[in-house]
Amino acid sequence: MNNYLKNTFENKKILILGMGREGKSTLDFLNKNFSNKNFSNLDISTADQKNGENYLDNLKNFDVIVKSPGIPWKLDKIQEALKAGVKFTSQTQIFLDLFKNQTIGITGTKGKSTTSSLIYHILKSSGKDVKLIGNIGKPALDFIENANKKTLFVYELSSFHLTNINVSPHIAILLNIFPEHLDYYESLEDYFNAKANITKFQDENDIFIYCSDFQELNNIAQKSKAKKFNFSTNDKLESYKTNLLGKHNLNNIKAAILVCKSLDINDREIKNGIENFVPLDDRLQTIRIVNNILFVDDSLATIPQATIAALESFENKNITLILGGFDRGIDFEILGKDLKKRKNVLNIILIGQTANKIEEVLVKNNFSGKIYNLGITTMNKIVKLAHDITPKNGIVLLSPAATSFDMFKDYKDRAEQFKKYVSKI
């Protein structure tokens, strides 16, 4: 155990805040590695919530708090504890303190799961000892027992993981940046700053790979001390066969190639890895062709830019688009302007809390297709209507541009229900 961890946890009163997958993993790690066992845990689902956020009242009683990523830093009780001198850390911070030099960290508003999986797949296929961790895999600390100095970790990092860390991975990838998680951060600037932490603490021995299409990423790169490599939508990509649909995935492939080349993976192994990679569920996944209509699941498209990228994948097909969901305060104007130009989008089915909001944007931008505003409804009704209004050889595309928490447990539940009712047609 390194000195940082001893100094942080030995003989301290410790609270694990948030007992989801990551919190349980952290408790297991602490129990295995520290003898004092002075660990408490707290989770909103099991705490007494009669008085709102009172479950956070006693944070100042601890020396160290290991906070789960989903709990916002902006909460008053957390800010008060920080000011009172309580030390906060996270599983990401602990892991990077141990394995920074063996970690490939990937972030971006969209595309990080596909890019992480693709990098992992190429490295694994080329014979490397590699683990896929973080957002897409198991919690990072679950893997340290069986790791050695040659183990590589492909770590999918959300902005929540990156907020308030003070160490960056050896290889950092920043794919893109769009407004997102505005319910979690005080401002858009705070969100951008969290993403910037992936390279902020790198030095000249580290590597930063980023997309130069975004001015914000160029600004972040200017401040980075790492060796820098960038890619752009305008860069030509060698003609690989790929199962990944959509122009946006070309950038994910470019990022993966730069990572693998920096690790001296040869061109043949990179090419083979790209060509036999199977796309992830719920990202432009073909579900079924029924009555000459193709049903496509892109439930993970939770912001307008992701939906626009999906539409670009089917520019020559007539589309019925299923849009809408939980209202997080995101502006849909960019989507309205894009849909105004797309004469192949014949129908839009609006669902969820954002249905009226999106309809206003579509009307304002003179969308030429038909609008069906279903609001809060069932997936059964959505799929039935989509099938009935879509012409033969057309596509029904679930690409909602919004999260799912108003009508479904999460994006996965939304996707599973879509698949279920498509299978019943």
Image (cartoon, grey):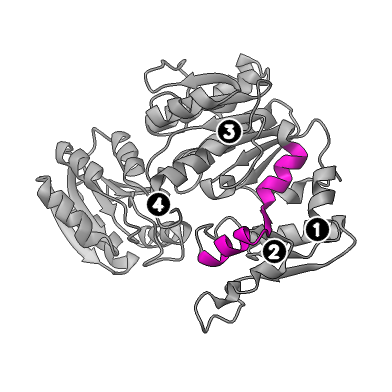
Q: Quadrant of residue 377?
A: bottom left
Query: Is 97 within the magenta?
Result: yes
**Disc 3 and disc 4: Cα gap in Å?**
32 Å
Q: Is residue 139 visible?
A: no
Image spot of residue 2 (x, y percent): 84, 43
Q: Main secondary structure of the magenta part?
A: helix
**Disc 3 and disc 1: Cα gap in Å?**
28 Å
Q: Residues within 10 Å of mark 2 (few under 14, many from 20)?
A: many
Residue at the spot x=42%, y=52% of the render?
A: 181
Upstream in sequence: badge 4 or badge 1: 1
Upstream in sequence: badge 2 or badge 4: 2
Q: Residues within 10 Å of mark 4 (few under 14, many from 20)?
A: many
- Disc 4: which residue: 299
Upstream in sequence: badge 2 or badge 3: 2
Image spot of residue 260 (x, y percent): 62, 23
The amino acid type found where label 2 is placed reads Ile
Residues drawn in magenta: 76-99
Per the rendering, the mark at residue 16 is 2
Q: Residue furthest bottom?
A: 50
**Disc 2 and disc 3: Cα gap in Å?**
26 Å
Residue at the spot x=69%, y=34% of the render?
A: 103
- Disc 3: which residue: 200
The amino acid type found where label 1 is placed reads Leu
Q: Nearer the viewer, residue 393 or 42?
A: 42
Per the rendering, the mark at residue 279 is none
Q: In this rendering, is residue 242 above or below 301? A: above
- Disc 1: which residue: 30
Q: Is residue 66 left or right of residue 53?
A: right
Image spot of residue 6 (x, y percent): 84, 50
Q: In this rendering, is residue 58 above or below 118? A: below
Residue at the spot x=65%, y=41% of the render?
A: 166
**Disc 4 and disc 1: Cα gap in Å?**
36 Å
